[in-house]
């Protein structure tokens, strides 16, 4: 088959599966197998695709038609300009989380120590270290599967010798020392909402990375209550939040001794990040 014919057939298969971005996904899967790019479709649409290549494309199309996330199929996701490996058992980095990284970078200075709780693929911590000088950090996660992927991402994306460590434990369980910044994208979806999520998330993302308990605030409460033992006075805590959680999380931080608590919106105008400065002894 010719390249353009393969693309048209791939589009048809994914459109019949009612995927929102069927055309884009079809093109990206074809490019992944054939080692091509968008220009090949426009300029070299008559090139022949081998039977072996088309068979492999069809295998991937079957997976995508079953709502396996495209990033899971391709094995990577771009985040903050870096390509992070993803796999089963680790949350796929989302563009929304880039807002958290960008806000943390505004307060990040050379030589700071960063703690990334619920690190997953390591995308937040690795991005912060990649775009800073002489900073170091620890990524903590309960999942050893996720930590193994995070370690591989760090080895591939950071210069050798960078000060980065990953530890397994429930939140602060395996963490030692104090930090200038704590960043976290915790599980924050209410338990009763999870069955209503789109199949790509509900069926293919790790439940432990999604479920924030009955009201979605379980991890915010625990982190706010315990972080004082790990955060330097004047240090910063950054949370990604669900779009309806800003007021509740802001209150948790203020009650835990944080001042100058701010809510930051994403590019869609939705509340996405809450952060504050840890000053527990200051008189308001």
Image (cartoon, rainbow, N blue to C red):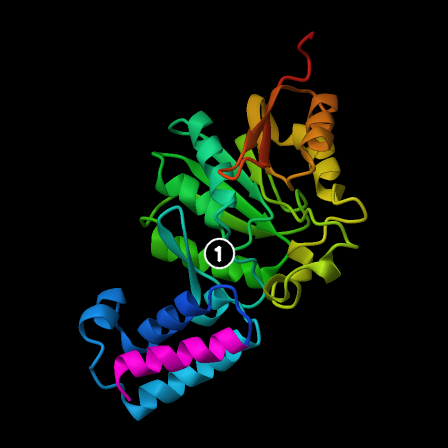
Q: Position of residue 281 (x, y in %)?
A: 68, 13
Q: Quadrant of the C terminus?
A: top right
Please, is residue 173 above or below residue 15 in the view?
above
Taking the image as shown, residue 141 lies to the left or right of residue 189, namely left
| Residue 178 visible in this rendered orientation of the protein | no
Single out the residue that lies furthest toward the top.
283
Residue 96 in percent (x, y) is at: 51, 45
Residue 188 horizontal/vertical position (percent): 68, 46
Label 1 residue SS: helix
Magenta-span inclusion, residue 9: yes
**Residue 146 visible in rendering:** yes
Q: Residue at x 51, y 61 (%)?
A: 148
Is residue 4 magenta-colored? Answer: yes
Residue at (45, 84) in percent of width and height: 59
Total numbered circles: 1
- Residue 227 image-quadrant placement: top right
Number of residues whose C-alpha sits closer than 10 Å to that of mark 1, classed few (under 14), some (14–19) or many (20 or more):
many
* Chain part drawn in magenta: 1-16
* For residue 170, above or below residue 201: above
Q: Quadrant of the N terminus?
A: bottom left
**Residue with the mark numbered 1:** 150
């Amino acid at each position: 088959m010719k390249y353009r014919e393969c693309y048209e057939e791939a589009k048809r298969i994914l459109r019949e599966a009612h995927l929102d971005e069927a055309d884009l996904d079809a093109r990206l899967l074809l490019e992944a197998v054939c080692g091509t790019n968008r220009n090949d479709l426009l300029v070299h649409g008559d090139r022949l695709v081998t039977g072996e290549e088309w068979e492999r494309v069809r295998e991937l199309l079957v997976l995508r038609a079953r709502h396996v996330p495209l990033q899971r199929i391709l094995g990577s996701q771009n985040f903050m300009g870096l390509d992070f490996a993803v796999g089963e058992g680790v949350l796929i980095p989302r563009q929304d989380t880039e807002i958290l990284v960008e806000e943390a970078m505004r307060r990040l200075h050379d030589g700071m120590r960063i703690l990334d709780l619920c690190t997953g693929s390591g995308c937040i911590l690795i991005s912060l270290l990649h775009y800073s000088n002489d900073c170091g950090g620890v990524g903590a996660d309960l999942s050893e599967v996720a930590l193994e992927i995070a370690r591989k991402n760090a080895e591939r994306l950071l210069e050798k010798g960078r000060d980065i460590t990953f530890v397994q434990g429930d939140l602060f369980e395996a963490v030692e020392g104090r930090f200038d910044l704590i960043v976290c994208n915790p599980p924050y979806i209410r338990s009763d909402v999870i069955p209503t999520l789109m199949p790509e998330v509900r069926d293919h993302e790790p439940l432990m990375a999604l479920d924030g308990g009955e009201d979605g605030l379980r991890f915010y409460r625990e982190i706010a209550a315990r972080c004082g033992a790990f955060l330097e006075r004047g240090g910063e805590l950054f949370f990604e939040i669900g779009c309806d959680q800003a007021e509740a999380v802001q209150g948790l931080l203020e009650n835990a001794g944080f001042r100058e608590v701010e809510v930051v919106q994403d590019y869609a105008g939705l509340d996405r990040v809450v952060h504050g400065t840890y000053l527990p002894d200051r008189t308001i």
